[in-house]
Amino acid sequence: MNRIKFTGIIILLFVGNVIYAQTFHAIIFADSDDPKIGRSVFNDYYNMQAECATIAAANNMKLKEYHYVDAECSKTNAEKVLQDLNCGPQDIVFFYYSGHGGRAYDDKSKFPQLSLSPGDAGLMPLYRIDEMMASKHPKFRIIMADCCNSYVPGITPKDKDLGGAKSVLKDQTAEIYQNLFGRLHGSIVVSSSQAGETSSAVDDGGAFTLCFLKELQKIVAGNSRPDWNALLNNTKTETYNWRSHTPVYDINVTDNPNTGQPVDIQTPQTSNSFISELIKIADNHSDELIRINLVKPALDNYFASPAAIVEIYGRNGKTLLTRENAKDFLQRISTSIHLISFVEISSQKNENGKITFLKLHEIYKQ
């Protein structure tokens, strides 16, 4: 059977509270290999990757990334990462998929199936991902899907018995992220279109994803109330007005009674060893001489030469803010004051695995 063609789905899962939460698990699946929607999907991937890093930093949580892009975006990998996921009861878990999706004529769920691999066997219902995440017992999970939810002949129901600016975190910005994520428990499930509808995408990303991020940033900027009902209702209105399809969602969340006062942003942690090393060099909690002494080892370990090119991009991943060589880049961040984290957009490496060209986004604390 030929691969079924749809547009992107997005799924998000978050868990925990600000005081006791430990790790932010960012699971992202992006079918950017697809010749029709690949460019849009990659932009979805970058946008959500950057947002995850910001949310983790705002909630003082270690960021653990599980990214499956291009050929790695498959049902096998999705099932495995969810089955193997080891998360604590206070962790935040985020699952995001951008690619194709659809539904059978007799599907009972209002949410779509994700087309993670070719053919009917490669489809995975959105509710199944919710079930697998729930089995890990997080306090708060969010699931979003930005894809077609249209009826497609040949799809069978999978019933349950079948099994450019900088990112700047101000204290008030961090508190808004904490109110939206760290202080809640429960679940949120979202898909980008209702039963029978297709979902649309532009080069910059999925229409639903772009509308969601736009509405989220309105809240983060203090221009809207930090409330999931308002956030998703506004996203629904914006998506329909722009592209004429209607997101659907279920919200079941409550405030965490154990939450105390807002927590100051600390040095972010991540499971990505390279980004972790950059954060160490940029960490102004450490003595500046110690940070400067980390520059040469990082240069030798990660870069092909001091002349390797590093480009810094704005939040949209497209606006080039600065270009410098690797040595100048590392020296600059070793004396920075407000720089707290990084998002790797893309990189090129030589035959020895050393970086020759790197694109990054930087996150600052004001």
Image: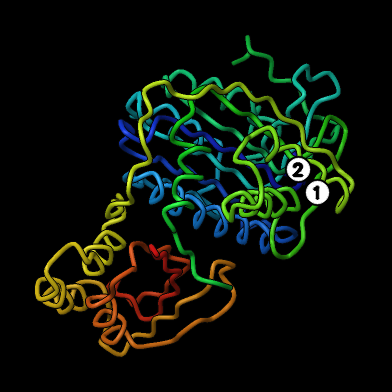
Q: Label 1 crowding class (10 Å Cα cut-off): few <14, some 14-19, many 20+?
A: many
Instruction: Specify the quadrant that holds the N terminus.
Output: top right
Amino acid tagged 2:
Asn
Which residue extends farthest top?
Answer: 161
Above or below, 57 against 119 in this view is below
What residue is pinned by disc 2?
234
Spot occupied by residue 240 in the image (x, y as percentages of width and height): 86, 45
Q: Residue at x 64, y 48 (%)?
A: 98
Residues at circles 2 and 1 in contact by the CB criterion of under 8 Å: yes
- Give the labeled residue for mark 1: 238
Relative depth, front residue between 228 and 319: 228
Please give the label number shown on residue 227: none
Q: Secondary structure at mark 1?
A: helix
Tell me the quarter of the picture where residue 139 sits: top left
When the figure is inspected, residue 87 is found, relative to residue 339, above or below; the finding is above
The image quadrant that residue 115 belongs to is: top right
Q: Could you tell me how many numbered marks the image carries?
A: 2
- Residue density around tag 2, few if under 14, some if 14–19, many if 20 or more, within 10 Å: some
Q: Residue 42: x percent and y percent?
A: 60, 60
The quadrant of the rendering that contains the C terminus is: bottom left
**Residue at 11% across / 69% down in the picture?**
287
Left or right of 363 in this view: 303: left
- Residue 296, compared with residue 342, is above or below; it is below
The image quadrant of residue 138 is top left
